[in-house]
Amino acid sequence: MKTKMRILSLLLIAFMVIGLGGCGSTDKSIENTATQNSTITNEQSAKADKAEVLTTGEAAQTEDQTVEPESGIEGSDILVVYFSRTGEQYTVGVIDKGNTSIVAEMISEETGADLFEVIPEEDHYPMTYSELTDVAKQEQNDNARPAYAKDVPDLLQYSTIFIGAPVWWGDWPMIMYTFFENNAEGLSGKTLIPFSTHEGSGLSGFDKKLSSACPYAAVIDGLAIRGSDCQNDQDSVRKKVSEWVTGLGY
Ligand SMILES: Cc1cc2nc3c(=O)[nH]c(=O)nc-3n(C[C@H](O)[C@H](O)[C@H](O)COP(=O)(O)O)c2cc1C
C-alpha cells in the first residue's frame, strides 16, 4: 500500500511539473507575441510617421507648385535682380540703357534666367551725374533704405539669384540693401551671385557685403564689368559674361 501511495505521489508530482512547464511556455509565447505586436505597432507607427512626413512633403510640394509668381515671371529657377540708371553716367555721357541693365540682360540671355529690375518707388535720383553722386552720397551717409516700386516675384521658385548694381561710392547703392533686407527670408538658402559695373573699383566688396546682408545664403564669386565697355564694347562684355556663367556651370 505504501509503495502504491509513493508511486501515485510521484505520478502527481510529474504531472504538476509538466503542467507548470506548459504554462511557462504559454507565457513566453504570449510575451513573444506581445513583443512582436509592439514591434509591429512601432513599425506601423514609424510607417504612419513616414506617411505623415510624405503627406506633409507632398502638401508642401503642392503648395510650392500652386504659388503664383507675383510679377508674372515664371519658368526658370534662375533669377537676375538688378538696379541700374540711365541719364548722365561717368565717362559715357547720357545713356538710354543703363550699364548694369545691359549686363543683366546678357546674363539672362546666356542662362535663360528671369529678370527683375529694382526700380525706385519715388524716382528722386537726378539725371545729371554730379547731382546723382551727391544724392547717392547723402543716402550712404544716412544709411538710408530707399523704397523700390514693385513687389518682387516669389523667390521660392529660384535656386540661383544673380544680383547686380553699379558701384556707388565703393558700395552697393542703398536701395539694394532695402532689397536684401525686405527679402531676407526669400534669399536664405539660395545661391547668390553678385555682379557690378564700375569705373575702376571692380567688385568693390559686393560679395562680402552681400554675404553679411544675407548670412543664410551661399554667395559665390562675382563679376565686375567696366561700365563704359557696356556702351562701347559690348562684344567683349558678352564674351566675359558668357565665359563667366559657363565657368560657373550655368
Ligand atoms: C553715384 C555714383 C557713384 C559712383 N561711385 C563709383 C565708385 O565708387 N567706383 C567706381 O568705380 N565707379 C563709380 N561710379 C560709376 C558707376 O559705377 C558706373 O558708371 C556704372 O557702370 C553705372 O551703371 P548704371 O548705368 O547701371 O547705373 C559711380 C557712379 C555714380 C552715379
Image (cartoon, rainbow, N blue to C red):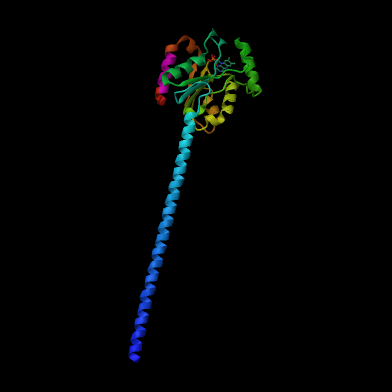
Is residue 60 something one can see in this rendering?
yes
**Which quadrant is home to the N terminus?**
bottom left
Q: Position of residue 45 (x, y in %)?
A: 45, 49
Q: Which residues are magenta?
A: 236-245
Rendered position, 190 above or below 131: below
Q: Is residue 112 magenta?
A: no
* Depth order, front residue of 197/50: 50
Ligand 1: which quarter? top right
Above or below, comparing residue 188 to residue 17 in the picture: above
- Circle count: 0
Identity of the residue drawn at 61% across and 18% down: 121
Residue 109 position by quadrant? top left
Whether residue 191 can be seen here = no
Q: Position of residue 92 (x, y in %)?
A: 53, 9
Residue 11 appears left or right of 122: left
Across and down, in percent, residue 39 comes to 42, 55
Residue sitting nearer the eye, 163 or 91: 163
Magenta stretch prevailing secondary structure: helix
Residue 243 magenta-highlighted: yes
Q: Relative to the observer, which residue lies in front, 204 or 93? A: 93
171 left or right of 238 in image:
right
Check the image and report above or below for 199 versus 191: above
Name the residue located 42 percent from the left edge and 63 percent from the top edge: 31
Q: Nearer the viewer, residue 164 or 119?
A: 119
Q: Which quadrant does the C terminus fall into?
A: top left
Q: Residue at x 35, y 85 (%)?
A: 8
Residue 189 is situated, as x and y percent measured from the top left of the image, at 50, 33
